[in-house]
Amino acid sequence: MSPNEPANPLGDLLRESRRFPPPESFAARAHVRDRTVWPEGEEARLAWWAARARELRWTKPFGRILDWDPPFAQWFADGELNASVQCLDRHLGTPRAHKAALVFEGEPGDRRTLTYAQLHREVCRAANVLRALGVGRGDRVAIYMPLVPEAVVAMLACARIGAVHTVVFGGFSAKSLADRIVDAEARVVVTADGGWRRGHDVPLKEAADEACALASSHGVEVARMLVVRRTGRACPMQEGRDAWWHDAVAAASPDCEAASLPAEHPLFILYTSGTTGKPKGILHTTGGYMTGVAATARMVFDLKDEDVYWCTADIGWVTGHSYVVYGPLANGATVFVYEGAPDFPAKDRFWSLIAEHRVTIFYTAPTAIRAFMRWGDDLPARHDLSSLRLLGSVGEPINPEAWMWYRRVIGGDRCPVVDTWWQTETGAILISPVPGVTVTKPGSATQALPGIVAAVLDDAGRPVERGSGILAILRPWPSMLRTIWKDPERYRQVYWSRFGPSVYFPGDGAKRDEDGDFWLLGRIDDVLNPAGHRIGTAEVESALVSHPRVAEAAVVGRPHEIKGDAIAAFVLLRGGPPPADAGERARLADALRDHVGDEIGKIARPDDVHFCADLPKTRSGKIMRRLLRDIASGRALGDTTTLADPAVVDALRRQYAAAED
Ligand code: WTA
């Protein structure tokens, strides 16, 4: 086991022997019914992807499939298309035109449905508004919104005119938004007055204003801001810069020809955490991304016209991009969208939504599933969940117990469960069961999808046929990231240097079992996954040291029953030892948590704050992270000793030194 490998929080996965073949009734009607779909060999693989790409509508057909100059790939590079056309125009003139594209329910219970024809008109109007604001091809637009239909409209409107959206999760702080505006050099921001979350009106426009001021002090001037009225909270509008979305959109023409864009035209930048304090702007382009998300949404979710599909992710994450917006809409699906929290006004909100909207496909994260388990079986039992036919999981490893509960209690033992592995960088799902074909196992993402070549490698890069190692993707795929925005060198170094420039290194540990199935074991780098959200330990550390009381900080993860990872911070204070008084220590810990919330966003607030007299470091000055992980999870220290005692730190350092130096 390499020192970086996490202690396996999932138990001994390889002892898991339960098997669930696809139910016959499901398999009989599934889009994919047998394994002949998986292409074999590189030539067949490329031809298979080209065939998937040709299922889209191209304004100029492509002749080239893949140009691969490791680690830089171009797919279908001489073709032209538009992402919004795949999601909208393609369905007009078919019976899908008047089916629901989006079915929305707000947290307060307000509902709206947009058919494909209506969504198309809204997107065209919004695209015209953006054009009138001076947004052109390749310009970046930041979207900082609650999960309301206008957020989807804004994304597709950018795509329509060839603008590049960068969606920033509404839970991120003004400072995080500012960092992204500056890095992307976004001159236009689309936001809302607020959004509803657990009955509270979360201010977004205020944060956006603050972000613009911060961005301006870093030399990036936001020229225009569009504001969607959602909660009705008062928000001052800045003359000459701000406009209400509904005024502008209502006045705009509903006709807007989609820009014909080269396949490699940038579609979006989505920031995600890595191992440094600076989030990476992951760049996705048009043709390959759309090919990947359209094909995988069809294969993995088996989308049919009569389905009501619900992915609970926010559009601020890649799951929201690929499997709320682009993938399902490209398939003409009916997408259910819910704005708020799962426990508002009560802990059975999701089940009542599924029952009322007759949801057939439900896709959520293990953290949510574990919380539902804890809330008890009687909550789902109160609702009719018989409309469900397929369940999905994403974002973190799912433990077999949660998988079994999901299948039994939510899926009534009748719905296949697809555990889908992928990342912001991969754009689309790479490893997952195909529900009409794959025999599933609780806790396993099973097999690479057609067109994907995945492997588990040992430290030296040799394939591990059976056992654990490092996950790697051996061939490029259409929806792969193209680069890190403005930082191709970091792109090469982070993803394509571990095993050479042509092997993609995702940063996850994995095992393969006797059938060759993949079991994902979590990150092997300093990235945490609390509640399925990616946070770099270095980001939290730099937020902590920006507090005037903090001299040094080290952040590690510890296993958490519901959230997967909890965030534990070890803090060395400036100017002397931590306060002796327990109450004072607790207040200071809270102040530091709030500070991290202000710097990054609530999702990054440390669960534990440990004050120490000294941070344990190796002789070469590296923080002893394994020791800190052991302390955080209660393995290294008893209840009575603390790191505030220098002698304790010293003793531990000696004990761990050999392992970590
Ligand atoms: C983790 C979310 C185990 C993994 C789509 C990956 C998973 C990171 C799974 C990407 C899964 C995602 N099983 N782990 N099914 N899905 N992960 O970029 O560590 O927010 O590297 O994309 O989440 O997180 P990201």
Image: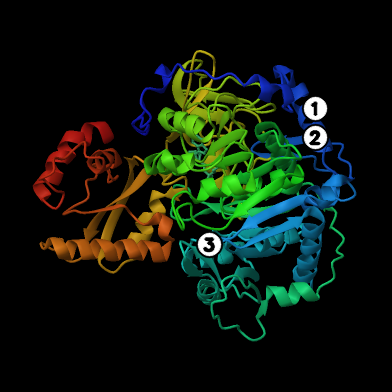
Q: Which residue type carries mark 1? A: Ala
Residue 373 visible? The answer is yes
Q: In this rendering, would 586 be left or right of 134?
A: left
Which numbered marker is on residue 65? 2
Residue with the most extreme bottom position: 239
- Tell me the SS state at disc 3: loop
Disc 1 and disc 2 in contact, CB within 8 angstroms: yes
Label 1 environment density (alpha carbons within 10 Å; few <14, some 14–19, many ≥20): some
Q: Which residue type carries mark 2? A: Ile
Q: Earlier in the sequence, mark 1 or mark 2?
A: 1
Q: Give the residue at x 51% y 30%.
A: 407
Which numbered marker is on residue 170? 3
Of residues 53 and 246, the one nearer the viewer is 246
- Tell me the SS state at disc 2: loop
**Residue 648 x, y percent position in the rendering:** 11, 45
Give the number of the mark in front: 3 or 1: 3
Residue bearing the label numbered 1 = 47
Q: In this rendering, would 467 be left or right of 62?
A: left
Q: Give the residue at x 56% y 83%.
A: 236
How far apart marks 3 and 1 lie (CA) works out to: 40 Å
Q: Which residue type carries mark 3? A: Gly
Question: Where is residue 627, by image quadrant?
Answer: top left
Label 2 environment density (alpha carbons within 10 Å; few <14, some 14–19, many ≥20): some
